[in-house]
Amino acid sequence: MTATALDDGSAPGQAAARPGGMTAGQPRFDDVPLGEEWHSPLYAMACRQFARAADVLALEDEVRTRLLEPRRSLVCNFPVRMDSGEVVNYTGYRVQHTLAMGPTKGGLRYAPDLGFGECAALAMWMTWKCSLAGLPFGGAKGGVRCDPYTLSAGELERITRRYTAELLPVVGPDMDIPAPDMGTSEREMAWFYDTYSQSVGYSVPAVVTGKPVALGGTVGRHDATGLGVVFSIESAFEELGWSLPESRFVVQGFGNVGSVAARELHARGAKVVAVSDIRGAIANPHGLDIPAVLRWVAEHYYLEGFPDAEPVDGEAMLELDCDVLVPAAREEQITEHNAPRLRCKLVVEGANGPTTPAADRILAERGVVVVPDVLANSGGVIVSYFEWVQSHQKYSWQALEVQERLRTQMRSAYDRVRATATDLGVENRTAALASAITHVSEASKLRAIYP
């Protein structure tokens, strides 16, 4: 591994302080400090956000130590026989951030650049997301380092089933409950559910959420994250006195989150002027016909070539003139480099970690309001919780009941964040994290340390 600079500018080998008290001068293996394998730029970003909120709360050092780093982590390497007959080794991860709140909860991500640090950061954010939403879960995240778009259905099934088998010691309906994430869907959750159930000898629908409805999934789970983003936008607009039909939106990402958010905004009369996917972006200053865009993508898979719109560079679309920017793609999309050029008044984060701490400061100085990810995109885990409850109760809810319960919990979380922001005199992200951390730290202190 090549020596690289640490976050504070020091080089490996110097005695620079690291989160958790370890210094760079301590024993290392291949330039990674022993016991800190999850450190990465994304994890460092999550730690900086945590530290900011912890400072505002004057959180005790003991609680900081307990909440900063993951409680449990699993890395597995497993062989899979491909369609060609070749055997390929894949790497899988599962990180459980805290066990203080109950079972852990979080998605399974299939991506070619997935790493331990990314899973650790996302697990930490999931803890705050669950806490803010009032769910009895700690955060978790995991997945397999692979490119799902280059694999056949048979190869994906074999990867999923083998990965599930590797996770058997650490997952269960009251231990750790996975769900879909980037690169996975209800299909992979069905395979996960079946593999786990086959291993114990009976059906365990509560072991995973985001399942097909025929296997005990919840109506509306697919749309839940995108719909939750729209509910957050409605709450912000009500507070700001804005009108959806008079507002212009740019939505980055046209997957499960972005496409649903764009569809629901269009249905409410809003003008969606640009959307993007992995191949680029399309824009129309007069507003895109989102139902037509959805039909085009269903037929052609990508936005590229859609008529009645102009192609736009994927990065440049973030800087288009609009009232609201909804980053619903990947992490670290809004940085110190493009934050000064954004021409929106409000950012509502549909993705996890799309805005870096440096960009947060710039947006705050410019008066751009941010509705943070741990609030705005919590709809998915909220409805996953509903599904988990229904799986345990062996009782299903109607679609309208699920939607109204989601709206109620999203509104409650939004109001809690805004009240905390006012009380502490901080911006929304720090307020959201402070509210969540307060709840988790109280639970951690009450459970004490065993033995």
Image (spheres, rainbow, N blue to C red):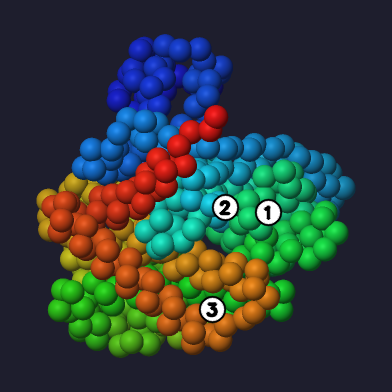
Using the rendered image of the protein, determine whether residue 16 is visible from the camera's viewpoint.
Answer: yes
Mark 1 touching mark 2, by CB under 8 A? yes
Mark 3 touching mark 2, by CB under 8 A? no
Q: Amino acid at mark 2?
A: Pro
In the picture shown, does residue 258 fall above or below 9? below
Q: Name the one closer to the observer, 416 or 353.
A: 416
Disc 1 or 2, which lies upstream in sequence?
2
Mark 1 lies on a secondary structure that is loop
Q: Residues within 10 Å of mark 3 (few under 14, many from 20)?
A: some
| Camera-side mark, 3 or 1 | 1
From the top left corner, tell me how far across and down residue 233 is, in percent.
29, 73
Q: Which residue is pictured at 49% across the width and 84% down the height?
A: 401
Q: Residues within 10 Å of mark 1 (few under 14, many from 20)?
A: some
Q: Which residue is mark 2?
A: 103
Q: Amino acid at mark 3?
A: Gly
Q: Which residue is pictured at 68% across the width and 54% down the height?
A: 172
What separation in Å lies between label 3 and label 1 (alpha carbons)?
A: 23 Å
Q: Which residue is pictured at 29% across the width and 67% down the height?
A: 414
Mark 3 lies on a secondary structure that is loop
Q: Which residue is mark 1?
A: 172
Disc 3 or 1, which lies upstream in sequence?
1
